[in-house]
Image (cartoon, rainbow, N blue to C red):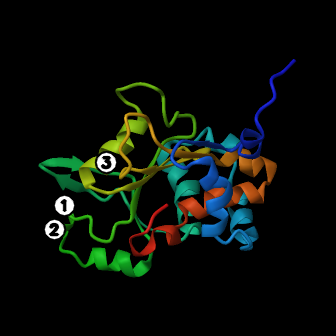
Amino acid sequence: MKAQLPEFQKDFYFLKNNLFTTYTLQVDFKNTYDFSLDLTEVFDKICSLYDKNRFAKLNEAQLEKDFISKVLEALGWHLLYQEIKIIQGKQEKPDYILFPTLEEKKKYETIPQEKRRFSNQSIAAISESKAYNIEIDNKKVQDNPHFQILHYLNNLKINFGFLTNAKFWRFYDNSKLSSNKIFYEIDLEAIIEKRDIEAFRYFYFIFNAKNFAMGGGA
């Protein structure tokens, strides 16, 4: 006989998480975020963009252009793509630096170019992308996207980061130190294939730019 999943795991089939407690997911989220908000338009837009068969044929840059950047924008983010940073003489180039408002992005862009290289002013989060067929956590120590995003967060002194291959989206809060891997991971493909707008709320509210405005963050 096939083992039965606990009710919590059934309800959250789309989630791998050790960043938030079960109580936070089941109770606090619904008190913190407006779960009555009509997300039909943004959900339909993201669903219409999603094509896993086509994504499998795209390289990372193509996937970023065709899907990832559009999802980030649909979530309210204002983006700068592969902005070069130089920290302690070492060049860093995350795929996206993210601003929760256009005003914050413009404020950053007024910084002289040579000073922007080492500034994280107004940056709310960074996002790193991989091609659809690349695992976002391959369990290796070297050449593992999981450690790559943490490297960027540590070096750039930014707390919040996203890591995605379009199918899976991970949220990292680097202010929470632990000996274990700590993240909140959504299987967006599973949500889209089930057309599960209620599950989509757990993606939308965490990755939405408004969640990071005014120094906030999940």
According to the picture, the residue beneath numbered tag 1 turns out to be: 118
N-term mark: 2 or 3 = 2
**Residue 116 at x, y = what percent?**
21, 67
In this orientation, which residue lies closer to the viewer: 19 or 169? 19
Write the residue at 14% across / 66% down: 114
Give the amino acid type for the residue marked by disc 2 in the picture.
Lys
Which residue occupies 34% across, 27% down? 142
Where is mark 2, residue-wise? Answer: 115
Tag 3 secondary structure:
helix
Judging depth in this view, the residue of 102 and 214 nearest the camera is 214
Q: Write down the residue under mark 3.
A: 152
Q: Amino acid at mark 3?
A: Tyr
Give SS at disc 1: loop
Residue 50: x %, y % from top left = 68, 52
Q: Residues within 10 Å of mark 1 (few under 14, many from 20)?
A: some
Give the farthest residue toward the right.
Answer: 1
